[in-house]
Image (cartoon, rainbow, N blue to C red):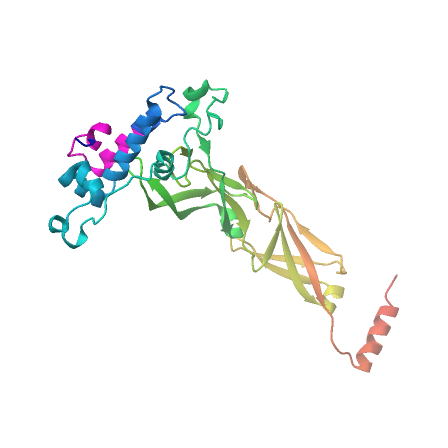
Amino acid sequence: MGQDYYSLLEIPRSATDTDIKRAYRKLALKYHPLKNKEPSAPHRFKQIAEAYDVLSDLKKKATYDKFGEEGLKGGIPTEFGGKEAWTSGYVYHGNPEKTFKEFFGGDNPFADFFSRDGSEVNTGFGGLRGRGAKKQDPPIERDLYLSLEDLYFGCTKKIKISRRVMNEDGHTSSIRDKILSIDVESGWKAGTKITFPNEGDQGPNIIPADIIFIVKEKPHPRFARQGDNLIFTAHIELVKALTGCTVEVETLDERILNIPINDIVHPKYSKLVPGEGMRLLGDPSLKGDLIIQFDIQFPEHLTPQKKQLLRKALASSPS
């Protein structure tokens, strides 16, 4: 009489693939030699692994169901099996640890609690009773690019992620999409981090990684940001730099500011406009400042007459 693989896994012959996986998981963890110190545990552990190796393979299982262990291991006569029949007997590779590691994806669920010689490691949680303290994958960081308008007004960003999720059987997984919602607050700066706990890939014996989005500022066509202040560069001709002008600035909220410049504009000159910068985090009614810098456009060519006029005008200017 051959082995009854179904009895070894403590399941009925009507068991589904999910039932087979669940039974092997339970019994393999129960009789693993690192956990179970009974003399019979290694033999039982090997029997369970062989039973799973057969019943989890559709072709082996079909052969075993029809011909039993003798037919499975002795080979099937071709008149019974046809073209797809086994022409040689099944031989288990004899390494239950290999089956165990393949099932758990190479992750030894006892690694946190046992050293290589099988002795328990003091985890601070009472040995195996601390099994609930699973290891968490390192965080996954992603850039979140936002415009200055997004950071000035605040907004909501919807981001689709794809991650591996464990199926209901608790053993297999699949890739699924999920939408994460980020409520951007007025005044956020580059480097702000938004954390979604445990939204990384799922897997056996791990805690999914946190996903962390890090704010990056998109380049802006009019402004550069400096803390809570906005920097605007005005391009003016030399004559306006010397005689004065009005600088027009369109703000982030689409207002038009006309800023009079009555000072002589030299290369290091800047004009500060209070309260026209970025909104402040925590109190959007308060804002930083607008700082106007200048790019003075010098003429590429002057006629002798214009040079003479400039010499007279500048020579006669009061010191």
The structure residue drawn at horizontal position 68% and vertical position 66%, both measured from the top left corner, is 236
**Left or right: where 200 falls relative to 228:** left
Query: How many callouts does the rendering have?
Result: 0
Furthest-top residue in view? 126
Q: Is residue 241 visible?
A: yes
Front residue of this view, candidates 304 and 109: 109
- The stretch in magenta equals 5-26
Q: Is residue 182 above or below residue 19?
A: below
Work out whether residue 4 or residue 113 is closer to the camera in this orientation and state it.
Answer: 4
- The residue that appears at 21% across and 49% down in the rendered structure is 87
Decide if residue 190 is on the left or right side of residue 8. right
Residue 171 in the image, given as x and y percentages of width and height: 31, 37
Note whether 48 is above or below 146 in the view shown.
Answer: above
Q: Quadrant of residue 60?
A: top left
Q: Residue furthest left?
A: 79
| Left or right: 253 as drawn, with respect to 176 | right
Q: Position of residue 145 (x, y in %)?
A: 50, 51
Which is more toward the observer, 158 or 187?
158
Image quarter in which the C terminus is found:
bottom right
Where is residue 179, by image quadrant? top left
Quadrant where the N terminus is found in the figure: top left
